[in-house]
Amino acid sequence: MTNLRYRCENCGNVTRFDVTRTQTTKSFYHYSLGGELNIEGQEILADDVSEVSCRWCSSPKSVVEVYEETDE
């Protein structure tokens, strides 16, 4: 399995990022008789990350994707 992480090449940050993304989902909406919504069985159909910026130095241009292999 491969995990995606981010790293800022400007300041070295590997833990704090602002991620702007758009998701298209398909969900089962279950309303109670009292009108309360319970969303069940959400499926992600599309996931687009449009920008990732460093929370420490605010740089969107210096953030790179880092892929890590795991044993799972």
Image (tube, rainbow, N blue to C red):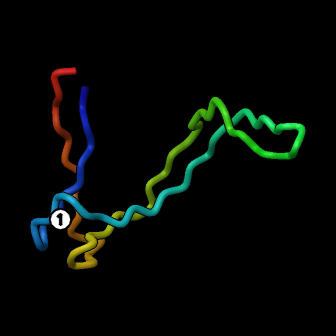
Question: Residue at image x 82%, y 39%?
Answer: 31
Image position, residue 8 (x, y; %): 17, 65
Question: In screen coordinates, is 39 left or right of 22?
Answer: right
Mark 1: give few (<14), some (14-19) or many (20+) Cα within 10 Å. Answer: many
Which of 62/71 is in front?
71
Q: Position of residue 57 (x, y in %)?
A: 21, 78
Count of numbered marks: 1
Query: In which image quadrant can residue 44 be found?
Result: top right
**Residue at the extreme top of the image, as rendered:** 72
In the displayed orientation, state which residue is furthest to the front.
34
Q: Is 47 positioned to the left or the right of 6 in the image?
A: right
> Residue 64 appears at what percent x and percent y?
22, 58
43, above or below 4, in the image: above
Above or below, 58 relative to 5: below
Label 1 amino acid? Cys
- Quarter occupied by the N terminus: top left
Which image quarter is the C terminus in?
top left
Q: Going by the image, does 61 lie left or right of 26?
A: left
Residue name at image x 71 percent, y 39 percent: 38
Identify the image quadrant of residue 13.
Answer: bottom left
Regarding mark 1 in the picture, which secondary structure is present there? strand
- The answer to which of 45 and 34 lies nearer the viewer is 34
Q: Label 1, on which residue?
A: 8
At 30% across and 71% down in the image, what residue appears? 60
Residue in the picture at 11% in, 72% down: 11
| Relative side of 48 to 45, left or right | left
Q: Residue furthest bottom?
A: 57
**Residue farthest toward the left in the current orientation of the protein:** 12
